[in-house]
């Protein structure tokens, strides 16, 4: 079997295509979560904690002057940007929670499928049971 034919068989399998669609949707979903965290959650956290802006929290490793923004500090040398890490960790937490809730909901929907009613007992079995019951009496 040629390598191209083998690759074609692999690439057109259903689960590979499903994975590709999942990766693409996951990338777009990641951008949505970034926006939710950066534009909605972090401003609320900042408001609650008295105006904190985590995105500019860093420790200058190249002797940067205090009070520079993170972008300015990065231009002058290396920085330990722990504020960015806090934001990314919050992104991950929100994304993981949303995915957990989606999987939980899907599992609930799968398990709630109504059970099929038991099939009706054949008439000959019903008659045999009646005969059995009458003989017992």
Image: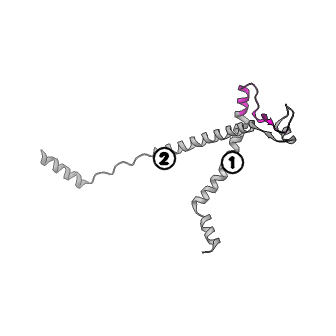
Query: Crowdedness of circle 2 by 10 Å Cα count: few (<14), some, many (20+)?
Result: few
- Residue 78, placed above or below residue 128: above
Residue 33 picture location, percent across and down: 68, 41
In this orientation, which residue lies closer to the viewer: 57 or 136? 57
Which residue matches tag 1? 28
* Colouring method of the image: one colour
Kindly indicate the quadrant of the structure image that contains residue 87: top right
- Residue 46, placed above or below residue 129: above
Q: Which quadrant, please, contains the N terminus? A: bottom right
In this orientation, which residue lies closer to the viewer: 60 or 70? 60
**Magenta-colored stretch includes residue 84:** no
Image point (68%, 49%), residue name: 27
Residue 74 picture location, percent across and down: 84, 41
Which residue matches tag 2? 110
**Magenta-colored stretch includes residue 48:** yes
> Tag 2 or tag 1, which sits nearer the N-term?
1
Tell me which segment is drawn in magenta: 42-62
Kindly indicate the quadrant of the structure image that contains residue 19: bottom right
Image point (23%, 51%), residue name: 126
Q: How far, Cα to Cα, is label 1 from label 2? A: 26 Å
Image point (69%, 38%), residue name: 36
Mark 1 secondary-structure assignment = helix
Residue 45 picture location, percent across and down: 70, 30
In this orientation, which residue lies closer to the viewer: 132 or 96? 96
Residue 13 picture location, percent across and down: 58, 63
Q: Which quadrant, please, contains the C terminus? A: top left
């Amino acid at each position: 079997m040629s390598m191209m034919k083998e690759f074609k068989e692999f690439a057109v399998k259903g689960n590979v295509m499903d994975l590709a669609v999942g990766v693409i949707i996951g990338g777009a979903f990641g951008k949505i979560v970034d926006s939710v965290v950066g534009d909605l959650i972090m401003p609320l956290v900042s408001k609650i904690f008295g105006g904190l802006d985590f995105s500019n929290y860093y420790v200058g490793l190249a002797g940067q002057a205090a009070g520079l923004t993170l972008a300015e500090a990065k231009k002058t040398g290396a920085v330990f940007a722990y504020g960015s890490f806090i934001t990314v960790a919050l992104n991950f937490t929100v994304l993981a929670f949303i995915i957990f809730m989606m999987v939980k909901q899907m599992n609930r929907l799968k398990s709630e499928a109504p059970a099929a009613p038991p099939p009706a007992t054949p008439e000959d079995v019903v008659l045999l049971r009646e005969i059995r019951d009458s003989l017992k009496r």
